[in-house]
Amino acid sequence: MSDFSVVLILTDDTSKTGSNKPMMLQNIMGLPLLSWLTAALAADGCGRFFFICPEKFRAAAQACFPEGVDLTVAEETDVSDRLHVFLSTAEEEEHDVTVIAAPVVYLPGAKAESTASGAFRIDRTALMDALDERVSLHELRENGERPLTAEDGFFRVSDPAELADWQPLLTKSVLRRLVMQGVEIWDESNTYVAPDVFVGAGTVLLPGTILLRGTVVGCNCVIGPNSYIEHCSIADDTTVKSSQLYDSSVGAGTTVGPFAYLRPNSVIGANCRVGDFVEVKNSNIGDGTKISHLTYVGDSDVGRNVNFGCGTVTVNYDRAQKSRTVIGDDCFIGCNSNLVAPVKLGDGAYTAAGSTITDDVPPMALAIARERQTVKKDWASTHKLKKK
């Protein structure tokens, strides 16, 4: 159920902004102003949007609406008819509709100076009647429909230079909302969370944390210090210390970092360890697996309860193509092992430290791929450095 509906009009004001993007698609902290606006409206109860936008900006603009909202996008040729349908299908108790026809931010309760916002509220039935008579939204606004001002939480953004001024206020509003939902934030001035991010109760955000692009963080996690997470899913009871994560997912009870790097399409299971100076790319890591330090895992499918020794590399690229490494459950990868893809290790297999594995290893086998040690007695005594 929607508490209220919004008609949102994005105009092509690029001649004013001097940019190839209209004001509503200019970025604040890497996200368009439109994303901040729609997320704030949705958080306040708006579940239905009617959106009017020039065709050339439509794809980028539609990506700015939160998932789960009812979004109607109208072509310029059928705005009146589709808007009439949109209004007629609203909840019966919804008497007014909010119309936003200019670049604005929505910050209920904020204290800031602002001119007229470019937003107004109109009786829903009156608007439907006006549409039948082909009266424009501009004409309605000029004829006394109630303007929305700073007292209503709407603030006009007049030019791109103002966007940086709004960033601290917008960020603080997101952080305050998270605090009210049970999130512990140590330093509001040094924590940055996008409006479309979800963080579960009991989670602690330490200084230097940056959460962007629809990231979902579960309950009772510890994120930071100095962690950058973009478009990721982090399950409950997980810790991410001083690391960067992109387009990946991490299971419950896992520890990532410090100084780990998860590249896109990485799936880390539950109760795993991805330690310092570990890079994972386009790989699936099974539950309970430990990759403690100084290791690269790329284009790999790793089973459960695998132990990676320090300095392991999955060698996935031969300059012509990338190949996958497959590691079964309960394997032990010795320190400084090179696994040259495509290669497969069966369940329970071992590789000896310092081995370069080029052939498949059967289950429960030990693979040794290194030259036998040779010891030459008294060699050093005959090869002393000559004094200068």
Image: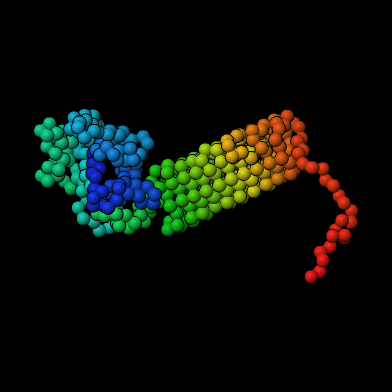
Return the x and y of residue 344 as percentages of the image width and height: 67, 31
Return the x and y of residue 63 as percentages of the image width and height: 35, 39
Return the x and y of residue 191 as percentages of the image width and height: 45, 54
- Quadrant of the rendered image containing residue 369: top right
Residue located at (59% from left, 45% from top): 279
Return the x and y of residue 305 as percentages of the image width and height: 66, 36
The residue positioned farthest toward the right in the image shown: 377
Whether residue 207 is visible here, answered yes or no, is: yes
In this view, the residue in front, 93 or 157, is 157
Q: Is 283 on the left or on the right of 347, as rendered?
A: left
Q: Is 30 on the left or on the right of 370, as rendered?
A: left
Q: Is 227 on the left or on the right of 310, as rendered?
A: left
Residue located at (30% from left, 57% from top): 161
Image height of 356 relative to 26, above or below: above
In this view, the residue in front, 52 or 271, is 52
Quarter of the figure that contains the C terminus:
bottom right
- Quadrant of the rendered image containing residue 339: top right
Residue located at (48% from left, 55% from top): 208
- Quadrant of the rendered image containing residue 38: top left
In this view, the residue in front, 188 or 201, is 188
Whether residue 40 is visible here, answered yes or no, is: no
Q: How is the image coloured?
A: rainbow
